[in-house]
Image: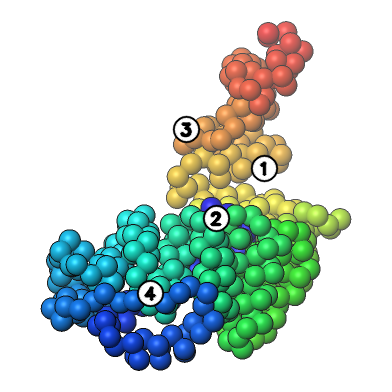
Amino acid sequence: MKHARGLTALASAALLFTVASSPVLAGDSHAAKAKQEVQYPNATRAEPKLDLTSEKDQKNLNAGLDAVSAGDKAKAEPLLQGIVDGSKSKYAQALALQGLASLKYNDSDYKGAISLLQRSLALGVMPNDTYFQLEYMLAQFQVADEEYQPALDTITKWRAEGKKETAESYALEGNAEYRLGKYPEAIAAINKAKSLTDKPQASWNQILMASYSESGQNDKAAELAQQQLSTNPDDPNALHNAASVLVQAHKYPEAIQLMEKGRASGPFKSEADYVSLAKLYLVTGQDSSDPAPNAIKASQVIEDGMSKGVVKPSADTYVLLGQAAELANNTSKAIDDYNKAVPIATDGEAALRAGRLLLSENKYSQAKGMVQQGLDKGVKQKGVAYMLLAESERGLKNKPAAIAAMKLAAQQPETAEKAKAWLKKTGAD
């Protein structure tokens, strides 16, 4: 399944289906015609003749479909299955199959729901209003089951035969196009949906932003995101989407400004918000000639979140603070922050970071202890750790231990070349 990077995860299209209306006895053509005139007046499909003549079937159908609507599977299933198996009316069977399909959907058995709904439609005996309602429901089920191309085919058929255009149908189409990576088509469909209503759903704009972003139209994505945020200034999702698309457009100062407004007032409330802003400051600092100011701001953001009890004093938090202090050339603070992370970290990365900085300060004994602690807890790059351990031992004038550590570094792919060169230079290869 395709998703835009950084954007809030897109929810599946909202399923706006309802269980088919009460069945109509053959001969009650006036009611069926009145309903048809409201919903599908221009349909090309010929209206079939109804074959439901049994009042018993009608009663059981009503009871079964009402039970589906009420979420009473235990009552609905035997009533509806009995009609599918025993009724002489194809119309009654079709409506019963639709009810059973809804039960399958409610149980997240989308393939089962699709199969039953296709059987219902294949009987071909429903009035146009019911038939096209169920055909549209089929497209929704197919989207839920990630059958995006079949869903598009169903929507195309529904629109061509039913001669009806709705905002929701174009939004469903746009969702499927987006999932298939057909971004220009998704953009066109969502914009069409928005043109047909003055109350577009928020999820439509999410798909539109994601499609703009994925197709390289970052400026349009950012513009739309900021429009959404101005309309919903207290909506955390609107803030996150706006910040994400600005980052994707490499508009870091604008993203920071936006998030700082959220921090001052509004939807900036979670730990993830503080961490994201701090990391954005760090990224911006790393790309600048003088990283210190942005690195200091990153620390201030995290410390602000911690003072409010939003950001927890975790290993990740202290590592982030250490990275910020390191980028700001505040080595002593960075070592202190990494040291705070060490006892609560699940791996040895924080200890390794502290050891590297201690080594740069010529504090060889402390560096050795930290690097060894990192190795004991586990690090991603063992070769780097062994080389740092070797340098610590060399600073302590312990040549045999340095050689032993460097030989271990020579066994690791990422440091093999450098370690072997060091060993050769010292005559220990």
Q: Give the side of residue 429 with respect to residue 98, left or right.
A: right
Q: Mark 1 points at which residue?
A: 357
Give the answer, above or below, for where 37 lies relative to 158: below
Q: Residue furthest right?
A: 289
Q: Could you say whether the residue bearing mark 2 is in a helix, strand or loop?
A: helix
Q: Give the side of residue 419 with respect to residue 93, left or right.
A: right
Q: How far apart are marks 2 and 4 (CA)?
A: 29 Å
Give the answer, above or below, for where 6 lies relative to 13: above
* Label 1 packing within 10 angstroms: few (<14), some (14-19), many (20+): some
Give the answer, above or below, for where 339 lies relative to 108: above
Q: Which amino acid type corresponds to the residue marked 3 in the rendered image? A: Asp
Q: Distance between the residues labelled 4 and 3?
A: 77 Å
Q: Name the residue under label 4.
A: 48
Mark found first going from the N terminus, 4 or 3: 4
Q: Mark 2 points at which residue?
A: 149
Q: Which amino acid type corresponds to the residue marked 4 in the rendered image? A: Pro
Asked if disc 4 and disc 1 are in contact, CB closer than 8 Å, the reply is no
Q: Give the side of residue 156 with respect to residue 116, left or right.
A: right
Q: Which amino acid type corresponds to the residue marked 2 in the rendered image? A: Gln
Mark found first going from the N terminus, 2 or 3: 2
Depth check: 162 or 377 in front?
A: 162
Mark found first going from the N terminus, 1 or 3: 1
Mark found first going from the N terminus, 2 or 1: 2
Residue shown at 24% from the left, 83% from the top: 25
Can I make out residue 103 in this image?
no
- In the rendered image, residue 65, in percent from the top left (x then y), is placed at 24, 76
Number of numbered tags placed on the structure image: 4
Quadrant housing residue 59: bottom left
* Label 4 packing within 10 angstroms: few (<14), some (14-19), many (20+): few
Q: Give the side of residue 40 with respect to residue 365, left or right.
A: left
Which mark lies nearer to you, 4 or 1? 4
Quadrant housing residue 91: bottom left
